[in-house]
Image (cartoon, rainbow, N blue to C red):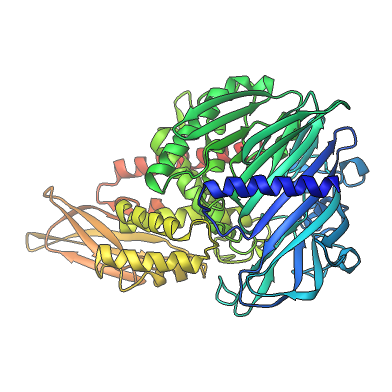
Amino acid sequence: MIHFLRISLLFCLVATATAQNKPLSNRIANYTIDVVLDADKKTLFGKETLIWKNTSNDRISELQFHLYLNAFKDKNSTFMKESGGQLRGDMMDPSKSMNLGSITIESMQIRNGETLTKKIKFIQTDDLNEKDKTVISVPLSKPLSPNESITLDINFKAKLPQIFARTGFADNYFLVGQWFPKIGVYEPAGMRYATKGQWNCHQFHANTEFYADFGTYKVSMTVPKEYQLAATGIFQSESPHTNGTKTITYLAEDVHDFAWTTSPRFVISERQWKHVKIKAVMQPEHSGSTERYFQSAITALTYFEKNLGKYPHTVLSLIDPPVNGAGSGGMEYPTFITCGTAWGLPKGFRFPELVTVHEFGHQYFQGMLATNEFEESFLDEGFNQYYEGRIMDENYAPGSQIDFIGFTINDMETSRISYITMKNPKITEVFRNAWEYPKGTYSIMTYTKTATLLKTLENMIGRSTMDEVMQTYFIRWRFKHPCVRDFIDVVNEIVPKRTGNRFGTDMNWYFDQVLYKAPVLDYALKSINNIEKDSKVSGQFTVERLGDMILPTEISVQFADGKQELIPWNGEEKSKLYKFDKAISSVKVDPQNKLLLDLNFNNNSKAVDPSMLVFRKYTMKIMFWIQNMMQWMAGIA
């Protein structure tokens, strides 16, 4: 009875807060959770009330939930089989039970109605691994009608894993993510790719993140009294108890996830930027990076507000993990991001800035544009990687990633290098379920090739047109679940209006190549010659298309008399000869290097007197390989 009274009171508080602010989302999934952390046993005891609304026109006779922590239950889960017990270089030893994580639903009941506990069954929506326990189906005796809501009371127990993949514990540091029974997304016919009403509730894979509906979260977390705490949303209250614990409550509105962290070692400081209170939750040994976190967060806030739209929340927490909890770093949740740094890191190594800028960007790409990260991971990570490159290169260059004793590496160039140095860049298309990418290609396709194809698109259509595309896409689809078709529709709406028929009636030809297929782009200058006949000199050159991707470009011709000509080339011919009635000194295809998808810029140009050109070309090659080596070293650090 006390539990239900408390829940009723909390929902009254939520309703009161909601009434004061117009909802930004449809608030389909709304949670009230009371959770107690046993810090010694690394265990959570939770009481969850979920109010879920059927916003479709379907009668729904089944609910589906994610139980993400069961990915760490044993070595037989799909996550562990696919990952081999590692993520981003961090390893887990599944032979030690203390390292493992799990979640158990102890009871589930419809408020004032049917008990569902014994009806719960595990399902495998993506593979035939019957030992995977990350998704459950819950049949309903009475189907849920259109516009009807259901209230579920759920008791659960969760064991946190030792951190190696986003969530868990490291000594007395806890990063609690993917930690509660979480309802999937019901997609009615016409939503994204659904041809009929269906649950979209995928298993937890090694290379997948998340997908959920928006709602409100009222979460009360009980932790040891000496622990500090930060969480998604806005702090509401703190209540001490006589047993050496305290309960801290946070409220978050118009979000699709909730994460929190707690530790007795945190050093917390705050900074105000316009309407946003930024909180840096630091390890004491990393205090030297506090200002770097603040400044990079402000840089990102400022850039996104100017170029996409206003950050809608009033809080942002920057969480700094300890070294032995680094597996929880570089992760995003609504109003709450985990960063990363190291003691004594020189300012020229801009890792804290890069991680903060990137993770903040997810407040837009996935935080508001809540795409399906299981099925279209590139819409989140790749679009965000594109903006990371813009922000870093425009605010920290030269050397936006590394600027050390005269050696510099910029952000966008590392994205391009990552793609063009693939052993087989034709191995897979970008548009693919995240768990189905060939081994070793997920991060390139999802992050860096996507960023490169977006930057190439920007270079082709112009920055102002690209900004209009991105702003229109953001405003139209924020607090919804867009798919890539929705983005392409915006491109096809905006680009012809701004560029006429320069690229045709739509840009489908571009996305067919860079997104749905995997051709490669490689333009080259095959030869250049000057021919003297009858005291007259004529010049000619031959361009080649070595790859099977076709993008329009330009050819810059420098004549011996000092004049220059810019020639448009549709890039369709496998080989094309150009002739002129005067001598040529040099020729370059794509003179401004707009087409970043081109695998080899070094074969784009030739000169009649090649001495300086050769010197420059080989200098570029040497720098290319140095940069590639440095990127590899950074990846294993």
Pick whichever, 561 or 264, lies toward us.
264
Task: Kindly tell me whether residue 96 is visible in this rendering.
Answer: no
- At horizontal 36% and vertical 60% (from top left) the residue drawn is 524
Image height of 316 relative to 55, above or below = above
Most distant residue in the bottom direction? 196
Give the side of residue 254 with respect to residue 468, left or right: right
Pick whichever, 578 or 371, lies toward us.
371
Image height of 570 relative to 584, above or below = below
- At horizontal 79% and vertical 56% (from top left) the residue drawn is 67
State the image coordinates of residue 313 (x, y, percent, origin top left): 52, 42
Which quarter of the figure has residue 468? bottom left
Most distant residue in the left direction? 535
Task: Kindly tell me whether residue 506 is visible in this rendering.
Answer: yes
- At horizontal 90% and vertical 36% (from top left) the residue drawn is 41
Quadrant where the image shows the C terminus: top right
State the image coordinates of residue 162 (x, y, percent, origin top left): 82, 40
Give the side of residue 505 with respect to residue 276, left or right: left
Pick whichever, 151 or 351, lies toward us.
151
State the image coordinates of residue 544 (x, y, percent, origin top left): 35, 65
Image height of 629 relative to 111, above or below = above
Q: How many marks?
A: 0
- At horizontal 88% and vertical 57% (from top left) the residue drawn is 107
State the image coordinates of residue 209 (x, y, percent, origin top left): 67, 54
Pick whichever, 569 or 141, lies toward us.
141
